[in-house]
């Protein structure tokens, strides 16, 4: 099922098309074109069709794979000669301007991250360029098709197998002088991350980073963690892989502990699980991301713990938003946060409450859900349990 791109039409205003100049790592480029390449290529969306301008190297593949009505080579516009004569930015702009003219496009909307050099070259060639302040494609991407939801679900299944591999390492570890050991050596954050990465590679997924943070490291929500893992301390494992075929992401966090938790840590874990369930109960179409976030804050504040809602300068307690959209990017719309707007069926969001204090450690539990017509479907099947 292809996305409905006609929602872009009102954004165009008096412009003729929506223009991208980026490589396939740019999620908006991949979404509009249905194509990925390591070097920048040009995509122009118009209400009449989608048009690509690519290098000769990518021409054949783009014709087969791209979601495009036409594909044209750069060489059709004497790209190399014009760049040599006019300079890379001006020459590229002139070539793109001629490409646009061939498709009846005299003015374009572009995303805020559009290359300045190309924009200047287009303007010098008489093409009107206007920045899309609304980031309309991000809004469209926030509502997933059934195929996209299946892509995320597949990535999440792989994610769960990686999480199981991490938990197994922690559970099977022995404890020597308060430090976890595996096969006679200290079990480190790095070793657990390596097992996660190997599992994901076997599952056809990749990731740039993952979090395996223990004790005080876990009190910083984005600390990747390092060094030996310790008994009786929380270990936050946050995995957010990308399926290498579809390029859709998953996201999940669990907190594990080998040994005995302190009463405070046990209370924090139970509160965080309660906050997770309260947020899930709030998820349905028409509810705002802000309201879902408030459900989490209510649980924590009722227990006497700090939140950024109650104290914007808080450094401990619940010190981040409740969640975010997931898709071609691991962080995208919609926001499940104080400024989060209305949720719609097809939104894929995380629910990830957490508590943090260097004197206690950190606890976070994260599920990945899709908003449905009458509530939500939890795409996460992994159990929630602190002590392994």
Image: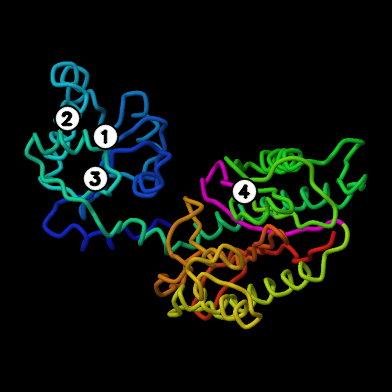
Disc 4 + disc 1, Cβ < 8 Å = no
Please name the residue shown 77% across and 49% down the image: 166
Is residue 265 rendered magenta in the image?
no
Q: What percent of the width, then of the height, locates residue 304?
A: 64, 79
Separation (CA) of disc 4 from disc 1: 41 Å
Q: Does 109 appear above or below 350?
A: above
* Residue at disc 4, secondary structure: loop
Q: Does 8 appear above or below 192?
A: below
**Residue under pointer 4:** 223
Label count reads 4
Query: For the magenta stretch, what is the residue range?
Result: 241-258
Please name the residue shown 23% across and 48% down the image: 110
Front tag of 1 and 3: 3
Q: What percent of the width, then of the height, locates residue 210?
A: 63, 46
* Residue at disc 1, secondary structure: strand
Please name the residue shown 44% across and 73% down the image: 343
Position of residue 94 in the picture relative to residue 51 (left or right): left
Disc 2 + disc 1, Cβ < 8 Å = yes
Q: Does 168 appear above or below 298?
A: above
Q: Which residue is nearer to you in this view: 7 or 301?
A: 301
Label whose residue precedes the other's in the sequence (1 or 3)? 3
Label whose residue precedes the other's in the sequence (2 or 1)? 1
**Residue under pointer 1:** 53
* Residue at disc 2, secondary structure: helix
**Residue under pointer 2:** 95
**Residue under pointer 3:** 19
Separation (CA) of disc 1 from disc 3: 11 Å
């Amino acid at each position: 099922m292809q996305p409905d791109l006609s929602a872009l039409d009102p954004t165009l205003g008096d412009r003729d098309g929506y223009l991208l100049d980026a490589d396939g790592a740019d999620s908006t480029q991949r979404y509009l074109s249905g194509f990925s390449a390591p070097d920048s290529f040009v995509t122009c969306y118009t209400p009449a069709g989608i048009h690509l301008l690519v290098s000769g190297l990518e021409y054949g593949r783009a014709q087969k794979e791209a979601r495009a009505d036409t594909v044209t080579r750069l060489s059709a516009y004497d790209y190399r000669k014009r760049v040599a004569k006019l300079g890379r930015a001006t020459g590229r702009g002139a070539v793109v301007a001629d490409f646009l003219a061939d498709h009846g496009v005299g003015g374009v909307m572009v995303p805020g991250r559009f290359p300045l050099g190309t924009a200047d070259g287009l303007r010098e060639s008489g093409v009107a360029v206007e920045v899309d302040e609304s980031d309309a494609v991000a809004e469209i991407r926030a509502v997933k098709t059934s195929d996209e939801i299946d892509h995320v679900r597949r990535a999440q299944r792989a994610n769960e197998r990686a999480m199981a591999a991490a938990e197994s390492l922690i559970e099977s570890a022995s404890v020597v002088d308060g430090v976890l050991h595996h096969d006679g050596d200290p079990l480190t954050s790095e070793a657990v991350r390596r097992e996660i990465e190997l599992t994901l590679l076997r599952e056809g997924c990749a990731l740039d980073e993952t979090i395996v943070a223990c004790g005080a490291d876990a009190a910083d929500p984005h600390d990747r963690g390092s060094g030996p893992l310790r008994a009786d301390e929380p270990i936050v494992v946050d995995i957010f892989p990308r399926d290498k075929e579809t390029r859709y992401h998953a996201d999940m966090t669990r907190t594990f502990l080998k040994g005995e938790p302190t009463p405070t840590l046990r209370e924090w874990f139970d509160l965080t699980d309660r906050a997770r369930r309260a947020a899930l109960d709030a998820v349905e179409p028409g509810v705002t991301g802000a309201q879902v976030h408030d459900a989490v804050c209510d649980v924590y504040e009722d227990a006497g713990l700090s939140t950024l809602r109650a104290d914007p300068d808080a450094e401990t307690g619940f010190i981040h938003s409740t969640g975010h959209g997931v898709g071609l990017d691991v962080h995208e719309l919609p926001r499940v946060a104080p400024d989060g707007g209305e949720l719609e069926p097809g939104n894929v969001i995380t629910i990830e409450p957490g508590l943090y204090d260097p004197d206690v450690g950190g606890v976070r539990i994260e599920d990945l859900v899709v908003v449905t017509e009458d509530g939500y479907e939890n795409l996460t099947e992994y159990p929630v349990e602190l002590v392994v």
